[in-house]
Amino acid sequence: IRDSISTGGSSDSDDSSYSFKSPSQDNKPTRVKTGETTSFGNRKATVTIAKATTGPTDHDGHKTVIITYHWKNTGDANTTFGELAMDLQVYQSGIGLNKTYLHSRGGSSIEGYKTQSDDIKIAKGEESDATIAYQLNDATGDLYVVANQATRYHEGIVSAFKAPTSGTQYEQVQPDDIAPAPKAAEAEKRKMKRISSYSGDALVSIDDVTTGPDDYQGRHTIIVTITWVNQSEANEPLSNAVKLTVTQDGSQLEMNYYTEPPLPQGYENMSFSRSVQPGVLAKATVSYVVEDPGQPVKVRLSSTYGGNDMVTKKMTPRKVE
């Protein structure tokens, strides 16, 4: 790879960087397994993170887990689980899992899973189950489940599960009973540059640009790989802290998504917007449509707040067969 790197603003100095407290850190009462949630339009509910069950592989070929959220409508209006506007996240080793959708094969139903169960409307006092599937990062890894209020002023409800050694049922345990998410080593963090934004700080490194497969229209693609550490106090995605811009010959490139398996090796859909716990080292891969994959592209990471923090790198995409 032929590359050059430059940084702008206060990327090299913690003292002069903008730094803000994330709103999700204000008054964050947490409840283990069961708690109350209040949403817009007088919607209220008691929500329980009830169970975790191994699911079938999804359309992309990922192994999955099904999380069951049991809830009771305690508000005055008829409502659905989806209308409670909760931020539902599942983590393995501090890395958020992508939501997915499961489809029955051959007409048989999927045990413990009901499609669009979060759209079922129930009346005050009634109870229901909402089942949501997630793509596993690790088939044997423990799970840390968070159900935040979407206002992000409350931490919400948490639970943890140990992966089954046999069968499909995860063992529900106290959050402290699973290993904490591994923190990034200081040596790794020193190689990165700090970018600060309203939602929190991130340490970032632009690692690689590789060629990807042509898309369904026959257009060439590239894949940008970023390593980063969440430096805020809250669970956040990289997209909250930084804006990613990729250009070639001064023209901004169009973002691309791979929709059919198999996905390119090392590429993960939605990893730029995937939530990561504080202090955890994570990778983000983003694909772009490019006119000429043999010519250099310029990758820029800048603060979403609009501050001066910036990292840029000019690279010729590394060819991958």
Image: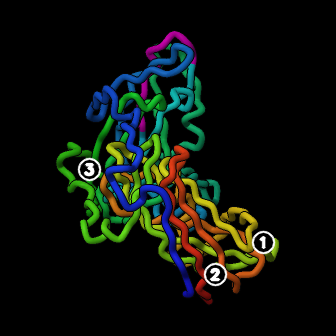
Quadrant assignment, res 102: bottom right
Foreground disc of the pair 3, 2 = 2
Q: Residues within 10 Å of mark 1 (few under 14, many from 20)?
A: few
Would you name the residue on which mark 1 appears? Answer: 216
**Which mark is first along the chain, 1 or 3?**
3
- Secondary structure, mark 3, is strand
Q: Is residue 16 magenta?
A: no
Give how far apart the Cα atoms at labels 3 and 2 are: 42 Å
In the image, taking residue 236 as reference, residue 268 lies left or right, namely right
Q: Residue at x 20, y 43 (%)?
A: 174
Secondary structure of the residue carrying tag 1 is loop
Q: Which residue is mark 2?
A: 211
| Foreground of the two, 210 or 200 | 200
Q: Which residue is labeled 3 in the image?
A: 171
Instruction: Give the magenta range.
Output: 69-78
Query: Is any part of residue 66 visible from this angle?
Result: no
Expressed as whole percent of the image width and height from the top left, the position of residue 11 reads 42, 59
**Residue type pointed to by label 2:** Thr
* Three-letter code for the amino acid on which mark 1 is drawn: Tyr
